[in-house]
Amino acid sequence: MAFDQPTRNRLQRFVADARNILTAEFTRQCQAEYGLDPATGAVADLAKLTQLSDADRATASILRETLRHYLAGHAKVPVDWDAAVRRGRLRWVQSSAAGLDHCLVPSVVESSIVVTSASGILGDQVSEQALALLLGSLRQLPVFFRAQQKREFIRRPTRDLTGATVLIVGFGGVGRRIAEVLRPFRARILATDVFAVDRPDYVERLLPADRLDELLPEAEILILSAPLTATTRGMIDARRIALLPRGAVLINVARGPIVVEADLVDALRTGQLHAAGLDVTVTEPLPAESKLWELPNLILTPHVGGQSSRRAEQVTDFFCDNLKRYQAGRPLVNLVDKRLGFPVRVGKPA
């Protein structure tokens, strides 16, 4: 299917609007204004949604039929997945996020619905966020920010990224981009992944995910970029934190529940962890009573790693390419193994 530029622009605006679908109230507004069915993602009046001209009616008809069966939505769109499965019309879900914990409910996993992710699309942005959190932690920026507020000009100890040993847990699209970003710092890079294949020459070791414990004692810096699955939930707990060298730094740009937060708090208080940088937490927004707020050696950002002024354009381009593939019967990019919870990577064993 070919999309002319005006139609692409309208789709981009639609994706940008979808980012704001965070509440049931907004969903109800979409139902009233656009005829959006939140259970299936179907749009009853696509012409009204995209404000198509008479010349676009043919395209609108194609897209309307397409959107009856394919759901391209933001991860925050509230969807009754069980109801969508029962209706039997939905064939394909294209997520705008890399993590798929929002949609891989049992009914979807057991169904014939095809699921594709946005894995790697926002790898540049998430890797920049990881680097910002990491450098801020190593160079003690929270300490100096507080000193600045007090008008104190006092030198404090800092640490280096250059030459440090970094372990990346989850070596998919984001993890690989993080490794590329770290390469100029001449860091010693280790990694684990379910698919331990295609090891870049600047990564010293790439081991299967079930051998994580072998690498933890070497990791001065631990960066999490793995998807949230039944296996990774609570993976970084007190036992594994204790395997790290004392004074290690932990960065999480994956999903909050991968880390046991109570164990993280204890490790930051005792010095087992020197510092941590979190872009994600178990509960978002983070409750006011969370102990994470109290930690002076923690940098916290509100899940902004994937933010970009170009996000709508990037996601739209990816979706349109995958839509053309689907219509032509060609393999989809980022096709998800629903039982694993992420796309399968095939390559040369590490």
Image: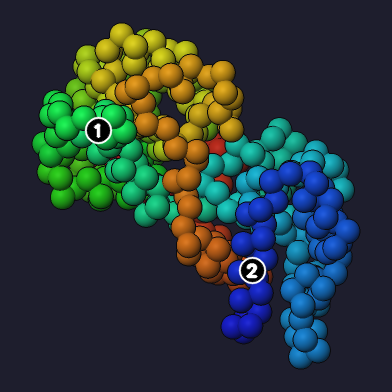
* Mark 1 crowdedness (10 Å alpha carbons): few <14, some 14-19, many ≥20: few
User: Would you identify the image quadrant in which residue 85 lies?
Assistant: top right
Residue 94 higher or lower than 252, as above or below: below
Q: What is the x, y in percent for residue 278?
A: 41, 32
Q: Residue 161 carries which label?
A: none
Q: How far apart are marks 2 and 1 (CA)?
A: 45 Å
Element on which disc 2 rests: helix
Q: Which callout, 2 or 1, points at the residue further toward the start of the chain?
A: 2
Taking the spot 28% from the left edge, 29% from the top edge, the residue there is: 150
Residue 76 seen by the camera: yes
Residue 180 higher or lower than 222, as above or below: below
Residue 140 seen by the camera: no
Taking the spot 59% from the left edge, 83% from the top edge, the residue there is: 5
Give the side of residue 278 with respect to residue 24, left or right: left
Depth check: 123 or 145 in front? 145
Q: Which amino acid does label 1 sit on?
A: Arg
Residue 215 higher or lower than 254, as above or below: above
Q: What is the x, y in percent for residue 301?
A: 44, 37
Q: What is the x, y in percent for residue 208?
A: 34, 31
Q: What is the x, y in percent for residue 328?
A: 62, 72
Q: Which mark is residue 151?
A: 1
Where does label 2 land, which residue?
13
User: Would you identify the image quadrant in which residue 142 lies?
Assistant: top left
* Mark 2 crowdedness (10 Å alpha carbons): few <14, some 14-19, many ≥20: some
- For this orientation, the residue located farthest to the front is 151
